[in-house]
Every structure is written in C-alpha cells, then in structure tokens.
Image: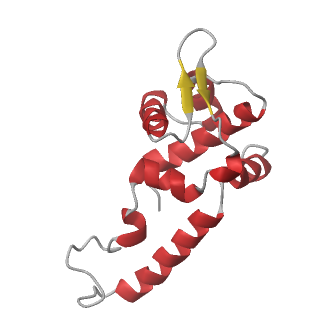
Amino acid sequence: MFSKGCEYGIRALTVIAEASKENQKIGIKEICKSSKTPESFTAKVLQNLVKRKIINSQKGPSGGFFISKDLDEISLYDIVDAIDGTDIFTKCGLGLEACNAQRPCPLHDKFEIVRSELNTMCRSNTLADLVLGFHQKVYER
C-alpha cells in the first residue's frame, strides 16, 4: 500500500530510533544492513526526512542519523506525509482525476472506507509503536 520509499523509510526509521534511544548516532551503512534496505535509495529518503525535520543528521567521524524528538511525538502519518505526501489518504484508489463524491468511480465508496481506516491507523500509531512492533515481530524471527 505504501511506496517502496515509504517502506524503506519506515524500516530505516525504526533502526535510527533504536540507536537514538541509546543516545547514539547511526551511519547509513549500518542502517541499511539492519533494515535490509538499499543504501543509495534509503539515503535519499533519509535526507528528505532530515529536511522535513523528522530526523537529524550530523556529518563527520562521529556523525550519523539520530532522532532528537520523543518517539511518541512522531506519528506514522507524519512519516508517510514526509515521504509520500497525503495523496494516499485523499486520492482516488483507481487514480482517476475526476473521482469525487459527486462523480464517484465504481470503487469510490469502498476506497473511502479504506482511506479513512488507513488515515486513522497512521495517526494513532507512533514511531515508538513501530519500534516495539518491528523488534517483537520482524527482526527477532
């Protein structure tokens, strides 16, 4: 449902968040190794997240990526918006420009429900929730 960039960004953010909980910065190579994401693409996504002030970066030998905010303050919605924008929550599921409540596509009402549930889920889950879930369900397998 999310773009590859968003998927990679979310996975990389969980790794950065873990390091940040220990007051450490983490480099792109280690992030990509842990999150199993491609380095050049992930680096571009992370630079965008720095510009959007979701994460921070510091150059130099003791540099790397880190998060200075409380992980509970960063919602999944904030992350998706920073990487992909909000089209996933608003646009026609079939990609039709003219689709709206007055001129709905054949799946408009069903997509409306899905978009609403996705929006609620993204707004009600934080980076702290993702970190906990990833390490309990994904990386510890």
On the image, the x and y values in percent for residue 133 come to 74, 54
Q: Is residue 15 left or right of residue 140?
A: left
Instruction: Look at 42% across and 37% down and name the residue there.
Output: 48
On the image, the x and y values in percent for residue 100 come to 28, 83
Question: Total marks drawn?
Answer: 0
Instruction: Look at 30% across and 88% down and name the residue there.
Output: 101
Q: Nearer the viewer, residue 140 or 20?
A: 20
Q: Furthest-bottom residue in view?
A: 102
On the image, the x and y values in percent for residue 25 come to 66, 24
Q: Is residue 57 left or right of residue 112?
A: right
Instruction: Look at 58% across and 56% down and name the residue there.
Output: 76
- The colouring scheme, among rainbow, by chain, secondary structure or one colour, is secondary structure
Instruction: Look at 57% across and 30% down and name the residue there.
Output: 32
43 over 9 or under it: above or below: above
Q: Furthest-left residue in view?
A: 98
- Rendered image quadrant of residue 120: bottom right
Q: Nearer the viewer, residue 12 or 62?
A: 62
Q: Is residue 68 left or right of residue 81?
A: right
On the image, the x and y values in percent for residue 70 come to 70, 44
